[in-house]
Image (tube, rainbow, N blue to C red):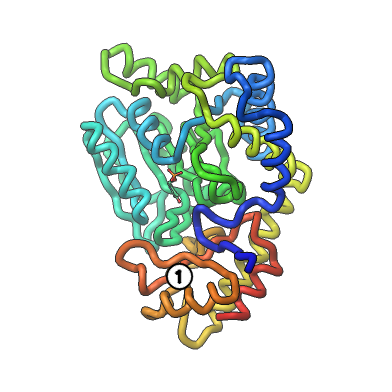
Amino acid sequence: MKKTYFTVGPSQAYPKLEQYLNKAIEQDIPSLNHRGAEFKEMFKETVEDLKRLLNIPKTYQIFFVSSALEAMERTILGCAEKSSFHVISGSFGKAWADYALQLNKTVIRQELDTNNSLIDLDIPKEAELICITQNDTSTGVWFDPKQISKLKRKFPEKLVAVDIVSSVPYVDLNFVNCDIVFFSVQKGFGLPAGLAVMIVSPRALKKAEKIKQKGISIGSYHNLLNLSQKALEFQTPETPNVLNIFLLNQVVKDMLKVGIESIRKQTEEKSKLIYSFFENHDKYFPYIKNVKFKSPTTIVIDVKGESEAIRKTLSKQGFIVGAGYGDNKLNHIRIANFPSHTIKNVRELLSYI
Ligand SMILES: *Cc1c(COP(=O)(O)O)cnc(C)c1O
């Protein structure tokens, strides 16, 4: 039976993935020299198209790394000499803070529950970098991107780094108010894992330069400065995931054709369907109550300990949804709402619950 993956990552493959994989083989993409003209052209095109799709300022650079977790580490090393501040709304934000601690930074953690607001945060003077998981996939807590902009305007001297792994391309972020933003491709883009994109401001690069000049490590084979230098030549320091960059290039071109506004509208329609179904259910209900914090893209449902039974029933019909994260494994199901999921998929999924 053909399965539909509503898991939060990896998730349902992009509908034309098979076609583009075949195209990659036909065009000898796996054998392409990563210092050659063809690769450079592909790098350049992918960067330009991503900038158009997500409305990224021209002055920002785009780097390719291997995962979002790697991007977290590069961000800490490049942007925090001594101290980083972490807004924590779930396990991914917590992991990011833990990495900073392992890199010997002074880590200031702020758990944010859904009664508070980002803009009310009190951030100490010593924190150089604010790390925000805009959509924490473990809990389904979403921060309004406008709040991130306001926070940056309140603390303009601090760098702001934002994880948008499970909300891209839906999230409409004002990049001008962010210094580093990153995502990996196995969620909203429906591609195989093993590639992440970092979007980096000139301010972040300046900071990395300053840290390096003090003799403090900003990373080895990948750091913000050598990634930047290589990106100016449309290359990466190491041999990158050329196949995945090719695939991303294809998908982004398709998304540009469809238009980001229409992708966002569809995401909202599907999210409304899912939330209203569970708001009217007599037993299960959305885990996040405050509407301002409800993720449109990774929807967490409290199913009163019936997670395994529901997942089994759905799986028999060919629908795979995620279990709860960590301690909530049995209490929650998690449903992804990415561009690869159609309205028809969603209606059918809900009909089996
Ligand atoms: C999945 C996920 C990550 C980790 O992504 P990798 O590509 O596995 O490193 C980080 N942050 C969030 C919010 C995620 O959902």
Mark 1 residue crowding within 10 angstroms, few (<14) / some (14–19) / many (20+): many
**Identity of the residue drawn at 60% across and 19% down:** 33
In this view of the protein, can residue 216 be seen by the observer?
A: yes
**Identity of the residue drawn at 69% across and 66% down:** 343
Left or right: 299 as drawn, with respect to 133:
right
Residue 73, image quadrant: top left
**Identity of the residue drawn at 57% across and 70% down:** 319
Q: Where is residue 236 shown, x and y percent of the image?
A: 52, 21
Residue extending furthest right?
257
| 211 lies above or below 174 | above
Residue 329, image quadrant: bottom left
Residue that badge 1 annotates: 333
Q: Nearer the viewer, residue 276 or 125?
A: 276
Quarter of the rendering occupied by the N terminus: bottom right
Q: Nearer the viewer, residue 352 or 339?
A: 352
User: What's the residue type where badge 1 is placed?
Assistant: Ile
